[in-house]
Every structure is written in C-alpha cells, then in structure tokens.
Image (tube, grey):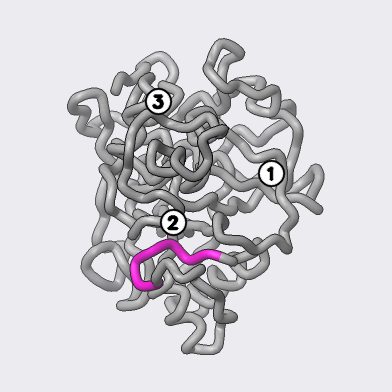
Amino acid sequence: MRQGAASLLLVAGLAASAGTVAATTDASAFAMPGNRDCAECPEMVVVPAGRFMMGSASTEPGHDINEAPRHEVVFARPFAIGKYEVTFDEWDACVADGGCTAVPDEGWGRGRRPVLYVNFEMAVGYTRWLSDKTGQPYRLPSEAQWEYAARGGTTTPWFWGEDANRACEFGNVGDDALRVERPEWPLHDCNDGYARTTAPVGHFKPNGFGLHDTAGNAWEWVEDCYNPGYEGAPGDGSAWLSGDCVRRVVRGGGWYNKPETVRSAQRYAGDDPARQNNTLGFRVVRLLP
C-alpha cells in the first residue's frame, strides 16, 4: 500500500509503518477490554482525528460521477467505529432483549458472520438499543466517517493498493470461486475461499486502521441521504441529511461484487431504506468523550 501524504494528513504523533497509519486506542473510553461497552457490544476501533480527500478522481478505475468532486473532509476529533460489521451474535443479543427483530441467515450460519436482511430503519434501531443499553452515543457512520475509516490512511483505489486482484487477501468478494456459477460476471482473478456466502468477520487482513471487511462481505448502511454528487457536501465529517432521503447510501460492496465496486470511494446510488436481502449489513459508530 502507499500513502499520499499530500492528500491525507493525520494528527502528529501517529505511527506510520509500511505505508499504513495506525489508529489510536483509548481503552479508558470503554467499559470493557477490547474497546467494548458491554459483553454483547461490538468491538470498536478508535480512529484518529485528521483530514482526507473524499471521493475519487476521474482517472480512477470504476470512477462514477457521484464520487465527484473530490473534497477535503476534516475530523477535528477522533471517533470510534466497529472493528467488524455487526454480527449475528450481536444482533441476536438485541433480539433476545426485545430491541430488534429476528432475521434469517440464508442457511450460511450465524455467530460471527455479518448480520443480513437488515434494512436502514432496523440498523438505526439497533444503534438506539445499543445507546440505551450502554448509555453511550451510538449511531450509523456518516458516509464521510465510513470512507475515512475504510481507507485506513491510504489514497489508492483499494485500501491495499492499486492491484485489484489482491482483494482476496483482504475481503470476501466476487472471485474465481463465484465465476464457476457466474462466468459472465466481471470478477476478481483470485480465490477468497467463499463462493456464494458471507465469511465470518475478521477472517481476512485488516486495513491500516485495523478495520476488517470494509471491502466486500456485506454492503453497509450509512446515515446519509443520497445525493448524486458531492457539491455542497459537509466538510466536517457529519452526515448529509438533506437531498433524496427516500434513498439511503450503502458502502463497501458485498461477497459477489467486482473490483470497481469494492473501491473505498464507491457509493451505491441510493437504496430503498426498506430493502432487506442477503447482501445488506452495517457497522456502528460511537462518539467519544
């Protein structure tokens, strides 16, 4: 991976190694070891304050006009984001407590696989339950928070670099195993070991901030309404809550997606907030004191 210092300037004192930038850890902000607020709560990663260029240039493979114009976003304070996508174990704890509705697993298994069949309002409901349970402010990531965290300190199309076919080291994506079933699809020339199913979270290598599965596995809901470009987008990392709020943004791609679709800048062009299927999940953000 390479890091573009001109495009990404993080606060002084952060460690940089092999082209990645380490996230900070502030265990005192959390009630339990592992950056958790309860035994059933998601494990969190504290992402440092800093700035980055959001979106993609027209020369980037797979660039879409809705990823333009590239613009600077500044995070004045660190924030915590899920190390993994929310799992069935975590969702089922909410179900058992009466805060969430049970969802199917497609026969792929539950446990530490990312929860599926969760629509936007259900994902928001989980964050409310988590906030009520812990007394801490949880919510869905803003689109800017998601991309900043997903890039992990890099400016390349994929957080691991410019070679799309290294994807199978870092995520569950559309690959050679899926090509057997879908030979007509433009897929990655590698094999991640999962043909038509999600993978347990954390199975693949993390990005430079220590987050897993920001490319592939399950698409992830973010808080923002859909806008067809970044003209007028917030520059402080907050969610963009005006525009087409009948549609909400999902990021990151899924287990079946081609290289262009699992880029850090890629945005799905708005999704029906009521949609539930075997490709939709989410991760959470927690504000810090």
Kindly identify the amino acid type of the residue bearing the numbered disc 3.
Answer: Ala
The alpha-carbon separation of the residues under discs 3 and 1 comes to 30 Å
Q: Amino acid at mark 2?
A: Thr
Residue 10 in view: no
The image shows residue 81 at horizontal and vertical percentages of 41, 53
Marks 2/3: CA–CA distance? 20 Å
The answer to whether any part of residue 242 appears in the image is yes
Quadrant of the rendering where the C terminus is positioned: bottom left
Side of 26 where 114 appears, left or right: right
The residue tagged 1 is 240
Assess whether mark 1 and mark 3 are in contact (beta carbons under 8 angstroms): no
The residue mark sitting in front, 2 or 1, is 2
Q: Amino acid at mark 1?
A: Trp
Q: Nearer the viewer, residue 232 or 115?
A: 115
Numbered mark located on residue 39 in the image: none
Where residue 275 sits in the image (x, y, percent)? Answer: 70, 60
Image check: 17 left or right of 262?
left
Q: Quadrant of residue 200?
A: bottom left
Residue nearer the viewer, 158 or 185? 185
Tell me the element at label 3.
helix
Q: Nearer the viewer, mark 2 or mark 3?
A: 2
Q: Earlier in the sequence, mark 2 or mark 3?
A: 3
Quarter of the view holding residue 31:
bottom left
- Residue range of the region highlighted in magenta in the rendering: 110-116
Q: Which residue is mark 3?
A: 164
Which residue is located at x 56 percent, y 11 percent? 59
